[in-house]
Amino acid sequence: MLNAGVLGAGHLGKIHLRLLNESTKYNLVGFYDANEENGKKVEAEFGYKFFNTIDALIDAVDMVDIVTPTLSHYDCARQAIAKGKHIFIEKPITNTVEEAETLRTLVAEYGVKGQVGHVERFNPAFIAIKDQLENPMFIETHRLAEFNPRGTDVPVVLDLMIHDIDVILSVVNSKVKHVSASGVSVISDTPDIANARIEFVNGCVANLTASRISLKNMRKTRFFQKDAYISVDFLEKKCEVVKMKDAPTQPGDFDMILQNAEGVKKQIYFDNPQISSNNAILDELETFADAINNNTKPIVTLHDGTEALRVATMIIDQF
């Protein structure tokens, strides 16, 4: 088992602490939180060992799980890497692309592994359909959330939209050609609602909408590709796959047939895959343990996290 320590014991940090404590692939050594009062409170309530300094925690573990505010990601990760520790770092990877690039260089230099917490890659609905995504040419995402003061220190692009940016970059095998976007600050000092259009060199277009001032929660993505429409509901963990194939010569009574202006007939059918329930956060942490133990590539690399941040920054720069 890998000895693991957590930096940051806020809302998400406590979830990571619980899951690492339950995991059969990690031995939770303890945690550090910059707020000593909160740290001792968490220690008293849950029994996890509270370390008084970052250095003391890093020295005691093999893997450091960084769940601190984004502004401190870089400093925490740099300290851990310099001591030869593997790092799991919550999204967004860092505050700037330059910081992310430096971490990528340091990880290679010190021979340690890093993974970024883009948890939607581990959503069971996305896992169920990702192998059916073949060269999508139009993608539409809506990620809407009710207002929550937590996370408003950064634009909604880094708070919410970056989840969809990462998913899109993971399925579109092409470089970004152009980005256009608009955002509006309603409650916060940074944009609370944003829309972005990402154009790729291969012709694919992605239209993304994110809001943290909605009346209801929604996390839906639709992929359109040749002869297929694929919908993923990341919130409800559901998916729908609608495909087309050449219509049979003699259609059945219940076959759904479409005919275009040229007279070509296509049959519509549903190919909805089985969805296996999981705990996405636990899965991302445990697959990172597998990558460390087996010396394999993490599912969400620091490169992936850097590219998601790069596109997010391009969007923000449009505001």
Image (tube, rainbow, N blue to C red):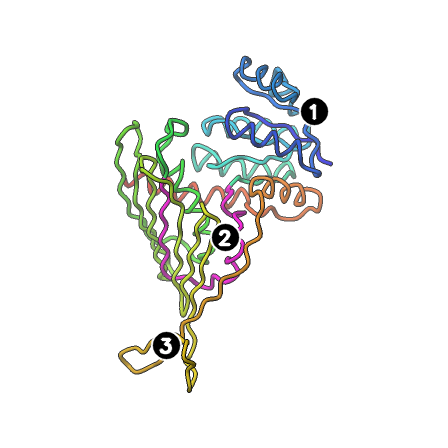
Q: Which numbered disc covers residue 129?
A: none
Pointer 1 or 2: first along the chain: 1
In this picture, residue 188 sits left or right of residue 106: left
**Residue depicted at x 40% and y 68%:** 226
**Residue depicted at x 56% and y 27%:** 14
Rounded to the nearest angstrom, the CA distance separating label 1 from label 3 is 64 Å
| Residue 28 on image: x %, y % | 68, 29
Does 11 sit above or below residue 145? above
Could you tell me if residue 312 is visible in this image?
A: yes
Pointer 1 or 3: first along the chain: 1
- Residue range in magenta is 118-144
Q: Residues within 10 Å of mark 2 (few under 14, many from 20)?
A: many
Q: Which quadrant: the C terminus?
A: top left
In this picture, residue 109 sits left or right of residue 117: right
Rounded to the nearest angstrom, the CA distance separating label 1 from label 2 is 36 Å
Q: Which residue is mark 1?
A: 60
- Using the rendered view, name the quadrant where residue 21 is placed: top right
Q: Which numbered disc covers residue 126?
A: 2
| Residue 103 on image: x %, y % | 54, 36
> 319 or 50, which lies in front?
50
**Residue depicted at x 60% and y 43%:** 283
In the rendered image, the residue lying farthest to the right is 1
Look at discs 3 and 2 and give the one toward the viewer. 3
In the rendered image, the residue lying farthest to the bottom is 249
Does 251 sit above or below residue 27? below
Q: Residues within 10 Å of mark 1 (few under 14, many from 20)?
A: some
